[in-house]
Structure formats: structure tokens, C-alpha cells
Image (cartoon, rainbow, N blue to C red):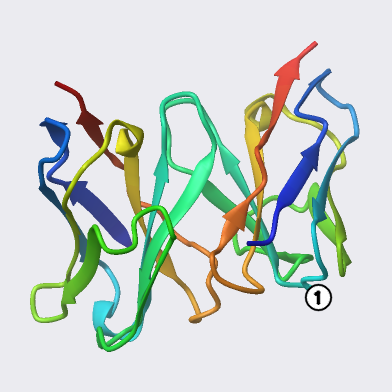
Amino acid sequence: EVQLVESGGGLVQPGGSLRLSCAASGFTFSSYWMHWVRQAPGKGLVWVSRINSDGSSTSYADSVKGRFTISRDNAKNTLYLQMNSLRAEDTAVYYCARDPFGGNWFDPWGQGTLVTVSS
Amino acid sequence: AIRMTQSPSSLSASTGDRVTITCRASQGISSYLAWYQQKPGKAPKLLIYAASTLQSGVPSRFSGSGSGTDFTLTISCLQSEDFATYYCQQYYSYPLTFGQGTKVEIK
């Protein structure tokens, strides 16, 4: 069974840092592009970042460019999102999601991890 | 960025109804469109990609159509488990963008 499990969320002060992890199982992780998508409380879905299968290519939403870094460790079947200079508007549930064919849609999604940026 | 606009933002329907949700792109995106279903407190689930291709395991009462700028998601016979929020997403270009969502509620 394909499974994605996020971790690393929590409460952080504005300007702080956090690293999210997404542990993958049930498929050949190193063959797939991966994404992060976030959802502020009560709001819609917003794409955050994408990484290709070997980690050599990444893309970011303008709102996080220069502050967030996506990476992966294919030996550990794990996706990461390093988040620096966090702002209140970064408060959201962060989902990792697999990209089935490098086509930039998402299936499946993890259960999400909540990041709260507040003093 | 390509803006995706869904209509309506919410709707009330009864079990057995036919429901149609519209998604409009601010510029042409060919058929690079996906639809997702999200239930409260849960992660989104892929329903349709390439505008009209049903994801494996998704009931056939769901269907998608359209190309260019105008797309529709249709639920042919609404079931109790279909009450949820639905999102469209374009993958024609970065940044990938979603519609604001359509909440399907029980009448």
C-alpha cells in the first residue's frame, strides 16, 4: 500500500525555522517527483514546491521562494521541506504528495502536518 | 500565474441529484486539469486528471469534461459519501494553482 506520512510540524515563533519530513513507503520513492501543498485553516489548497526524482530540479511558489527548501533522501525514502524565516501567513497544514507521472498532479497525499507560526 | 475560478462556491443538493461544478482558467490550459475531493479533516483525493480521465478506483458516477479554459466536474447521481469540497487544479504551468473550492452540502 502506498503511504506518505508527514512529521515535524508544530508551533514556531515568527522568524523561526522548522523542517518537515515525509516518509514514503509502498512504492519506489526514487522514481517519482514529489510535492508539498499547504492549506491554511478554513482555506483552500496552495501548491508550495516540487522536486524531481533525483533531486536535481526544484520549483517553488513565489510566496516561499528564498525561504523554503525542498529536498529528498532517496536512500531513506524521505522528502523534506526546510522552512526558514517563517511568517504568520505560513500557518497551515502541510501535505506531501506524490506526482504519478511527472505530470504535476497529486496522488496520493499524506495526512498532513500542522505548522503554526505565532508568538 | 494562472487563476482558476470555480462556480458555484457552494451548493446544496439531495442524494440522487445530478451535480455539476464548473472551473474556468484565466488562460488556456489545454487539458492539463485535475479534480480532487476533500472531506473535513482529511487529505484531498484525486478524482480525475487530464480533464476527463477517471483515476483508478473512483466511481463512474464522477466524470470530467472540457479543454482550453472551461471545465466541468459532474456527479451523475449524488451519494451520501460525495458530500465534500471539490477543487480543480491546473498543471499547464508553474506555479501550479487550484480553484477556491466548491462545497457540496446536503439539502
Q: Position of residue B10 (x, y in %)?
A: 76, 24
Look at 68% across and 32% down and name the residue there: B82
Look at 53% across and 31% down and name the residue there: B39
Q: Position of residue A108 (x, y in %)?
A: 43, 58
Q: Is residue A1 visible?
A: no
Quadrant where the N terminus of chain B is found in the figure:
bottom right
The residue under label 1 is B30
- The front one of A40 and A100 is A40
Quadrant where the C terminus of chain B is found in the figure:
top right
**Amino acid type, mark 1:** Ser
Look at 38% across and 70% down and name the residue there: A50
| Image: B98 above or below A59 | above
Residue that extends furthest to the top in the rendered view of this protein = B107
Q: Callout 1: few (<14), some (14-19), or many (20+) C-alpha neighbours within 10 Å? A: some
| Image: A5 above or below A61 | above
Subunit that carries the residue with mark 1: B
Look at 77% across and 53% down and name the residue there: B60
Please identify the quarter of the rendering in which residue A2 is found: bottom left
Residue A106 lies left or right of residue B49; in this view the side is left
Residue B99 lies left or right of residue B29; in this view the side is left
Q: Is residue B79 visible?
A: yes
Q: Position of residue A84 (x, y in %)?
A: 16, 52
- The front one of A9 and B45 is A9
Please identify the quarter of the rendering in which residue A53 is found: bottom left
Residue A61 lies left or right of residue B82; in this view the side is left
